[in-house]
Amino acid sequence: MTITGQDTNAVRALQGLEDGRSSVRLRAALEAGTKPDPRFVGKLIERCAIEPEFFVRDMLTWALTRHPLSLTLPALLREVRSERAQARSQALHTLSKIGDRKAWPAITRALLSDADDEVARSAWRAAVVLVPEGEEPGLATALAAQLGRGGRETQLSLSRALVALGEVIVPALLAVTTSAPDPRARAHALATQRLLRDPDTGFEYAIEEAKRVVALGGSGQEGQ
């Protein structure tokens, strides 16, 4: 059997993805995306689940977007059901970058409410990209159910996802601001309303203002 230069490059890239040096893994992922090869897909996805370095993970995702959807989509859809949180999160991130709505059925309520904040944040971003026309109100309701969870970064991610859906989120936010028993959820909903009305408002300012309104017993709807 003749070994071609292409085969040699593929072997080198596959080996590089397992190297202990992040710089080598980064170059290998770049090689895999620059010269796509069906042999790369399984290893790229496998590496996404365990890669510790953010920049390498981002390059792995880019490399996957360079491969045919017929190869990547089935594998990524399996990964979103993985028991490993990073595998779920990175697969969702990659699906959002690919942007093919055939992946929409994989964005389940379970993923949108995943106990791991990174998985949930990736699911929110992917959902906004992949949601089919007409299903935005249902997605808004599902996302609004997560208001109040996590720290500031998680809350900001959720607000951004909601705001990206546009005016369709208003009824879902109103339901939370007027009825939710959790003051954190009400404040988060008010802050998101503020960001929807005025995108230039800083999230930190919006959330602090909203917390004051809630503490004073308001819903933010007075005078509107």
Image (cartoon, grey):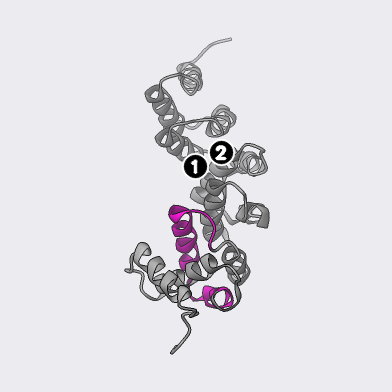
Q: Which of the marked residues, 2 or 1, is nearer the chain's N terminus?
A: 1
Q: Which mark is residue 86?
A: 2
Give the side of residue 95 with respect to residue 206, left or right.
right
Q: Position of residue 35 (x, y in %)?
A: 45, 30
Q: Is residue 34 above or below residue 178?
A: above
Q: Would you identify the image quadrant in which residue 49 lies?
A: top right
Q: Residue at x 49, y 42 (%)?
A: 65
- In the current view of this chain or complex, which residue is farthest to the bottom? 223
Q: Amino acid at mark 1?
A: Thr
Name the quadrant of the C terminus: bottom left
Q: Position of residue 69 (x, y in %)?
A: 58, 44
What is the chief secondary structure element of the magenta stretch? helix
Q: Would you identify the image quadrant in which residue 212 lies?
A: bottom left
Magenta segment, which residues?
148-176
Front one among 195 and 48: 195
Nearer the observer, disc 2 or disc 1?
A: 2
Q: Residue at x 57, y 73 (%)?
A: 176
Q: Amino acid at mark 2?
A: Gln
Marks 2 and 1, how far apart at CA: 18 Å
Give the side of residue 58 with respect to residue 112, left or right.
left
> Is 174 included in the stretch rendered in magenta?
yes
Q: Is residue 18 above or below residue 151?
A: above
Count of residue discs: 2
> Is 166 included in the stretch rendered in magenta?
yes
